[in-house]
Image: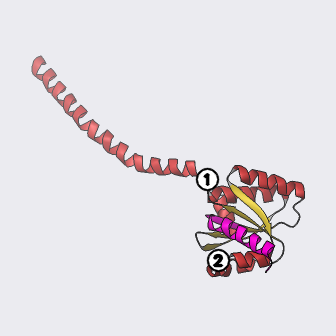
Amino acid sequence: MRAEKKGIVEAIRGALDRSAMLILTDHTGLSATGMSELRAVLARSGARYMVVKNTLLRRALDDASLAALEGGLAGPTAIAVTSGDCAALSKIIVAFAKENGAPKVKVGLLGGSALAAAQIGALAALPPREVLLARLVGGLAAPLSGLLRCMADAPRRFACVLNELARKAGGG
């Protein structure tokens, strides 16, 4: 293999090693302007979008990843990678494809596990991370606040009983 291609393979391998998620797409129908727009949106979220040759991508992938992604290594291929929020990457790719008709999601890789296009769509449909965390905190706090209300209610009731006894004793 030529030195130029070895350099490209090493650059792809480096991007893959640093990534938490990878999405393979078919970029057919995506204009140069559309490609630039998609790259800009992805860059703002800390992700990258690269057009790659399937043969060079095969060489950059390790055996386990290659087996998981083998079905997506046909036709024109571009990869979207992120080391940050995986749901955000999915949301951007799916929303851009919905608006522009391209790119078409082929397959993904998250934590060493292959994701079908439908699973990537489901990941994109998740609420934002902040909303999920707020729901978790709310779910954890609800039983505690109920317990606190119950515990605060007992002394209040006891004080009401004492007050009523004092009123009856003083009035009778």
> Label for residue 19?
none
C-alpha gap between disc 1 and disc 2 = 28 Å
Left or right, 93 with reference to 163 = right
> Label for residue 127?
1
Q: Contact, CB < 8 Å: mark 1 with mark 2? A: no
In front of the other: 132 or 156 = 132
Asked if residue 95 lies in the magenta stretch, the reply is: no
In front of the other: 1 or 52 = 1
Asked if residue 9 lies in the magenta stretch, the reply is: yes
Residue 22 locus on image (x, y percent): 67, 66
Residue 133 locus on image (x, y percent): 51, 50
Mark in the foreground, 1 or 2: 2
Within 10 Å of the Cα at label 1, are there few (<14), some (14-19), or many (20+) other Cα atoms? Answer: few
Within 10 Å of the Cα at label 2, are there few (<14), some (14-19), or many (20+) other Cα atoms? Answer: some
Could you tell me the amino acid type at mark 2? Ser
| Residue 156 visible from this viewpoint | yes
Q: Earlier in the sequence, mark 1 or mark 2?
A: 2
Could you tell me the amino acid type at mark 1? Pro
The magenta segment is 1-23
Residue bearing the label numbered 2 = 65
- Residue drawn at (87%, 67%) of the image: 28
In front of the other: 42 or 126 = 42
In front of the other: 74 or 137 = 74
- Residue drawn at (71%, 49%) of the image: 44
* Extreme-front residue of the structure: 3
- Residue drawn at (56%, 48%) of the image: 130
Above or below residue 75? Residue 131 is above
